[in-house]
Image (spheres, grey):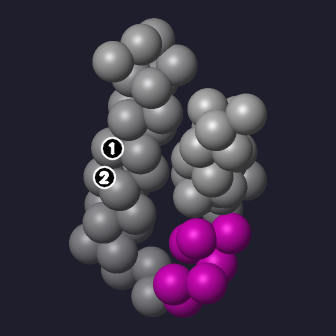
Amino acid sequence: MNEQELSIYNKTMIYILEYYFLLELGFSDINQIREKLNNRWGNISTTLLLIKIEKNK
């Protein structure tokens, strides 16, 4: 595992924790939560896809 992968895993864990934390606080609009988290942490699926494409070159 390299530093870039570790950074992605850390962002993913923070994203998940923050998502469930906001749900526990009573925020119920899941789409708004996802939009807020994607703006803050980036879209993790897209990041992983770009890395996969880069590795396959």
Give the number of the mark in front: 1 or 2.
1
SS type, badge 1: helix
Residue position for label 2: 17
In the picture, residue 10 is in which quadrant?
A: top left
Front residue of this view, candidates 42 and 29: 42
Number of callouts in the render?
Answer: 2
SS type, badge 2: helix
Looking at the image, can residue 10 be seen? yes
Q: What span is in magenta?
A: 29-35
Residue 57: x %, y % from top left: 73, 34
Residue position for label 1: 13
Is residue 46 in the magenta section? Answer: no
Majority secondary structure of the magenta segment? helix
In percent of the image, x 64 and y 78: which residue is there? 32
In percent of the image, x 41 and y 45: which residue is there? 12
Picture quarter with the N terminus: top left
Q: Residue furthest top?
A: 3
Labelled pair 1, 2 in contact (Cβ < 8 Å): yes
In the displayed structure, would residue 8 be above or below residue 34? Answer: above
In the displayed structure, would residue 14 be above or below residue 32? Answer: above
Looking at the image, can residue 47 be seen? no
Local crowd size for mark 1, using a 10 Å CA cut-off: few (<14), some (14–19), many (≥20): few
Residue 33: x %, y % from top left: 56, 72
In percent of the image, x 63 and y 52: which residue is there? 49
